Image (cartoon, rainbow, N blue to C red):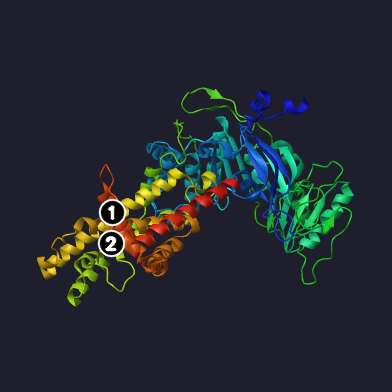
């Protein structure tokens, strides 16, 4: 009965899960008998709140987020509003992810990158301009990704996450390395998203920062959850006010502060943090400055701060919290060490200081403005963009100043369709958004034209090979190598600069995306083949006259063979780069066809058969012995003669093997 009540198919349970992100038992796979980076991590992130995943570097924050997003293998499961990520039809519309820098090609423009992701997410292209305006990157829309600063890159990452209007935002250390103003803007955007009913989960290593912007704090230490608290409870139990003092006589000052604490029967703790820095807990700047002034001690810094009590502080009522730094060098019950031998004491300019209760220190630099203490003050209601009605937001734990007004882009509607939603449009924008393809095409045309001129001057080259700029000694013509390189770049760039990695792990191995890449690669290869022949013929006509560019008698068969060769090279490059996840591997597979596969196919087809003296290739060239009743056998005979050629048969065999390998790796990834 109880099991049926908490079944995920139960309506009550689904209604609860619809409002939260629930991570259950996340555990990473350990290597070489080492402890796992994340061990049985479970927590919840509610809608309408900002949840901070807090932990020192190496605590397991990034690993936990990658396990939640199914980017890393491990145990456990995460429900995003009642469904795991692999059961969501369009994950990008449910979860927006920012993990590190923007994974885009450095030569692509900001607007081009967003428009490419619009096609992959199935949203209109105008959505890119709306998001750019929301994050303040309209003036930088034509800049290259490789030229953006750290702050602008973070803004672009948030724009990519907000592009399909997701319900949940998952960010890994979004404010790392940003200035104070950029951090405030970023946190205002996150809180605005939560105020409109969204869920925000982000990691950070600064406890004071987590207390400022988050509504709920989950603390990790050593890969385990040590605290799961509201921000107000977190600030009260873990963060502790203190006075920071820098003085060349820090040891002497610590002894004096301890003596005064014992004389006044107050609990004051003085922590020596190396060098000339002291942290005084349980006192104020006025008291510390008065003690230093009375005893003639030079003070270089005197400021209020908020100290960190360490992971898990306050979760156990019997455990005494410890400061974040080293063990105390002087406390209220233990005097500190003697002053340094070479330190000269400054004479007291006013011996009679007992009559002055609040003396002003005459030495030391003025203390900086203290950091405001964390206090659970509710924030006034905000107006949601679009309807004009105020919506109450969860109370914030600090009064963080809002220098600017942030607005999120308007919502969008997407029709259900396979992912990627617009694969052909996405692939066209991906290929046309960087100058690599244009550079490859220009190099191929130039090399082909020069090669044809040299071959014509040397002589002894057949006209078809002359027009294709294909020397007899070369395994492939420049156009075929260029088509293979363009095909290899189609998948090689996806793995080197994965724009779709934030959607579902690696690039989705789906039939729609593969078909789009093969289709666009075929169009590019055909255009390159036609331009190569046209430019070569034009240059030969200008240099040598019209006798070298006459139309051959069997031009249909030669044209079909030429187009099939460049298309096969493009397909081999696409499939090999998709299987081996490398552009170099894709181009190597194209080059291996004439160098390795062609000799093997030639040896098999030209050898005598065991059942007859005629070789297999000869029988293919002879055509079909029987005639079909409906005609059309001449086209099949032309195809068989094309396959009977060593290069044609080797290319067809290579493409078939690579297609099977691609399907096998895709099925294996789904089984995992």
Q: Nearer the viewer, residue 602 or 310?
A: 602
Q: Residue furthest bottom?
A: 458
Q: Secondary structure at mark 2?
A: helix
Q: Which residue is mark 1?
A: 637
Position of residue 114 measured from the top left corner of the image (x, y, whole percent): 42, 44
Q: Nearer the viewer, residue 632 or 212?
A: 632
Q: Which numbered marker is on residue 472?
A: none
Residue 473 found in image quarter:
bottom left
Position of residue 116 measured from the top left corner of the image (x, y, whole percent): 40, 45
**Mark toward the start of the polypeptide (1 vs 2):** 2
Residue 231 found in image quarter:
top right
As drawn, 392 above or below 597: above
Q: Which residue is mark 2?
A: 442
Q: Secondary structure at mark 1?
A: helix
Classify mark 1: residues with Cα within 10 Å, few (<14), some (14-19) or many (20+).
some
Question: What residue do we see at 33% from left, 55% from top?
Answer: 567
Q: Nearer the viewer, residue 344 or 507?
A: 507
Inspect this view and state whether residue 55 appears: yes
């Amino acid at each position: 009965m109880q099991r049926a009540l908490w079944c995920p198919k139960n309506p009550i349970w689904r209604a609860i899960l619809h409002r939260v992100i629930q991570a259950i038992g996340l555990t990473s796979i350990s290597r070489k008998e080492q402890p796992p980076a994340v061990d049985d991590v479970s927590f919840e992130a509610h809608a309408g709140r900002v949840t901070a995943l807090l932990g020192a570097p190496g605590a397991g924050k990034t690993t936990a987020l990658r396990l939640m997003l199914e980017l890393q293998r491990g145990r456990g499961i995460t429900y995003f509003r009642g469904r795991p990520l692999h059961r969501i039809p369009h994950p990008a519309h449910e979860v927006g992810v920012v993990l590190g820098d923007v994974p885009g090609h450095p030569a692509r423009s900001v607007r081009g990158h967003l428009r490419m992701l619009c096609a992959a997410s199935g949203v209109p292209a105008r959505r890119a301009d709306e998001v750019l305006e929301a994050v303040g990157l309209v003036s930088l829309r034509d800049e290259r990704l490789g030229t953006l600063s750290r702050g602008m890159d973070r803004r672009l990452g948030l724009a990519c996450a907000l592009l399909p209007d997701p319900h949940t935002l998952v960010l890994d250390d979004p404010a790392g390395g940003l200035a104070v103003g950029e951090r405030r803007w970023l946190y205002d955007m996150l809180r605005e998203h939560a105020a409109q009913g969204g869920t925000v989960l982000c990691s950070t290593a600064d406890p004071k920062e987590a207390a400022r912007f988050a509504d709920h704090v989950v603390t990790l230490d050593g890969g385990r959850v040590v605290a799961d608290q509201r921000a107000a409870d977190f600030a009260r139990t873990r963060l502790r006010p203190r006075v920071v003092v820098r003085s060349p006589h820090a040891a002497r000052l610590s002894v004096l502060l301890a003596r005064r604490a014992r004389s006044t029967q107050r609990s004051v703790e003085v922590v020596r943090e190396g060098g000339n820095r002291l942290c005084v807990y349980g006192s104020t700047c006025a008291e510390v400055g008065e003690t230093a002034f009375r005893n003639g001690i030079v003070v270089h810094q005197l400021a209020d701060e908020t100290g960190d009590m360490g992971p898990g502080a306050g979760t156990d009522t019997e455990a005494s919290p410890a400061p974040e730094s080293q063990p105390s060098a002087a406390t209220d019950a233990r005097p500190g060490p003697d002053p340094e031998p070479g330190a000269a004491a400054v004479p007291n300019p006013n011996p009679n200081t007992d009559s002055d209760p609040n003396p002003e220190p005459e030495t030391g630099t003025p203390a900086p403005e203290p950091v405001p203490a964390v206090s659970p003050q509710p924030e006034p209601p905000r107006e949601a963009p679009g309807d004009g009605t105020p919506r109450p937001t969860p109370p914030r734990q600090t009064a963080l100043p809002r220098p600017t007004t942030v607005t999120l882009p308007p919502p969008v509607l997407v029709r259900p369709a396979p992912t990627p939603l617009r694969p052909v449009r996405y692939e066209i924008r991906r290929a046309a958004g960087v100058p690599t393809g244009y550079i490859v095409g220009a190099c191929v045309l130039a090399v082909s034209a020069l090669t044809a001129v040299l071959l014509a001057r040397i002589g002894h080259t057949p006209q078809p090979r002359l027009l294709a700029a294909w020397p007899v000694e070369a395994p492939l013509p420049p156009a075929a190598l260029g088509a293979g390189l363009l095909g290899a770049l189609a998948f090689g760039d996806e793995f080197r600069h994965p724009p779709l990695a934030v959607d579902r792990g690696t690039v989705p191995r789906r039939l729609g995306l593969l078909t789009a890449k093969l289709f666009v690669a075929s169009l590019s290869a055909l255009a390159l083949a036609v331009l190569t022949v046209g430019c070569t013929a034009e240059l030969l006509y200008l240099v040598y006259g019209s006798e070298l560019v006459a139309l051959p008698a069997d031009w249909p068969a030669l044209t079909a063979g030429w187009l099939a060769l460049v298309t096969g090279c493009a397909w081999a490059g696409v499939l090999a780069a998709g299987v081996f996840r490398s552009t170099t591997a894709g181009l190597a597979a194209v080059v291996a066809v004439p160098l390795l596969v062609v000799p093997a196919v030639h040896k098999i087809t030209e050898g005598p058969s065991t059942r007859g003296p005629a070789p297999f290739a000869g029988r293919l060239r002879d055509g079909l012995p029987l005639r079909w009743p409906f005609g059309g056998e001449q086209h099949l005979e032309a195809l068989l003669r094309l396959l009977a050629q060593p290069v044609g048969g080797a290319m067809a065999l290579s493409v078939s093997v690579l297609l099977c390998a691609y399907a096998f790796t895709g099925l294996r990834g789904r089984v995992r």
